[in-house]
Image (cartoon, rainbow, N blue to C red):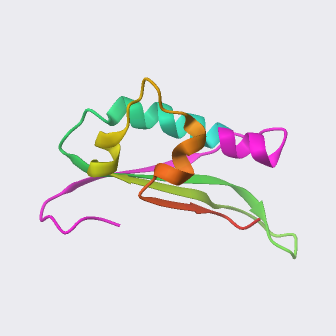
Amino acid sequence: MGTATEDDKIAILTIHASDNLTDNMFKQGIWMDTQKILKGIANEKEISEIAFFWQFETVDPYGTKKVDNVMKIIFNRETTDKINFSNFIFENIPKTATTYWEHPS
């Protein structure tokens, strides 16, 4: 994470995700919230990268619960500037993000 530019500014957001009825609705809720937040800070041109770390309670195979990253979404300035938020569909976040990762469970 970060850029090659010295003194670049990176916005790092760690956010607790909201539960939903299905896994698909859970992911879509995160994507919708990411779109809203990204749109709100996209005009802050001094920010060269925006990283979203979405967290939620997970349970390992042994039954141990912990809050963990369930999705990581990063947009660099170049990618953010390409987005037309008037027509952007939140389902395209995995395709358009500079970096996109989902927890395997």
Residue toward you, 91 or 60? 91
Query: Could you say where residue 69 lies in the image, as x and y percent from the top left?
Result: 60, 61
x and y percent of residue 90 in the render? 56, 37
Q: Residue at the location (27% across, 50% down)?
A: 78
> Can you name the residue that lies furthest to the bottom here?
62
Residue 92, how many percent across, how many down?
55, 44
Seen in the image, is 72 located left or right of residue 26? left
Residue 90 covered by magenta stretch? no
Location of residue 102 by image quarter: bottom right
Residue drawn at x 86%, y 75% as measured from the top left: 61
On screen, residue 14 versus residue 78, left or right, reads: right
Q: Residue at x 78, y 38 (%)?
A: 20
| Quadrant (top left/top right/bottom left/bottom right) for the N terminus | bottom left
- In the picture, the quarter occupied by the C terminus is bottom right
Side of 7 where 23 appears, left or right = right
Residue 10 is a magenta residue? yes
> Residue at left 27%, top 49%?
77
For this view, does 70 lie left or right of residue 38? right
Q: Which quarter of the picture shows residue 85?
A: top left
**Most distant residue in the left direction:** 6
Q: In this view, does 42 lie above or below 23?
A: above
Q: How many labels does the image show?
A: 0
Residue 15 position, x and y percent, is 54, 46
Magenta-tinted stretch: 1-28
